[in-house]
Amino acid sequence: MSNKPTALLIGDSICMGYRPLVKQRLEDKVNIIGTDDNGGDSSNLLKNLDEWIIKQNADLIHFNCGLHDLRVDPRNWKISATTQCLRRKLASDRQKTSK
């Protein structure tokens, strides 16, 4: 059993592309995990929250949906409502599990 913290890197194909490099660079410090599925946008992450994120019980969650969340209106650089909802849900679930 490792005493290293676990970081979940999840998101779109860009995230899937850099995950192996992050894993390699941090292998002595952090267990890097992810899913085999392309997470796409934050709406899709929210749909699969329990399976892909919550059950992983990671110490750190890094999600990158990047351009997928901007595709509705590329002129709108504000954080999408779905992303805000995902952040609130994760914070709520973290509070529940830390009690």
Image: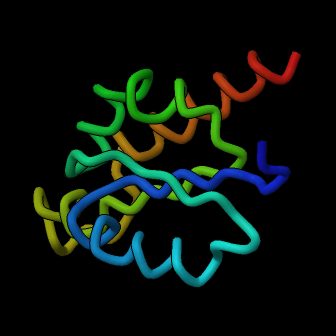
In the picture as drawn, the residue positioned furthest to the left comes out as: 72
Note whether 65 is above or below 39 in the view shown.
below
Note whether 27 is above or below 96 in the view shown.
below
Q: Nearer the viewer, residue 76 or 22?
A: 22
Note whether 93 is above or below 69 in the view shown.
above
Image spot of residue 19 (x, y percent): 41, 70
- Quarter of the rendering occupied by the C terminus: top right
How many marks the image carries: the answer is 0
Question: Is 35 displayed left or right of 94 in the figure?
Answer: left
Question: Is 26 displayed left or right of 64 in the figure?
Answer: right
| Residue at 64% across, 77% down | 26
Question: Is 9 displayed left or right of 98 in the figure?
Answer: left
Q: Nearer the viewer, residue 84 or 23?
A: 23
Image spot of residue 4 (x, y percent): 79, 56
Question: Is 38 displayed left or right of 91 in the figure?
Answer: left
| Residue at 67% across, 51% down | 6
Q: How is the image coloured?
A: rainbow
- Quarter of the rendering occupied by the N terminus: top right
| Residue at 34% across, 40% down | 82
Image spot of residue 27 (x, y percent): 64, 72
Image spot of residue 78 (x, y percent): 38, 64
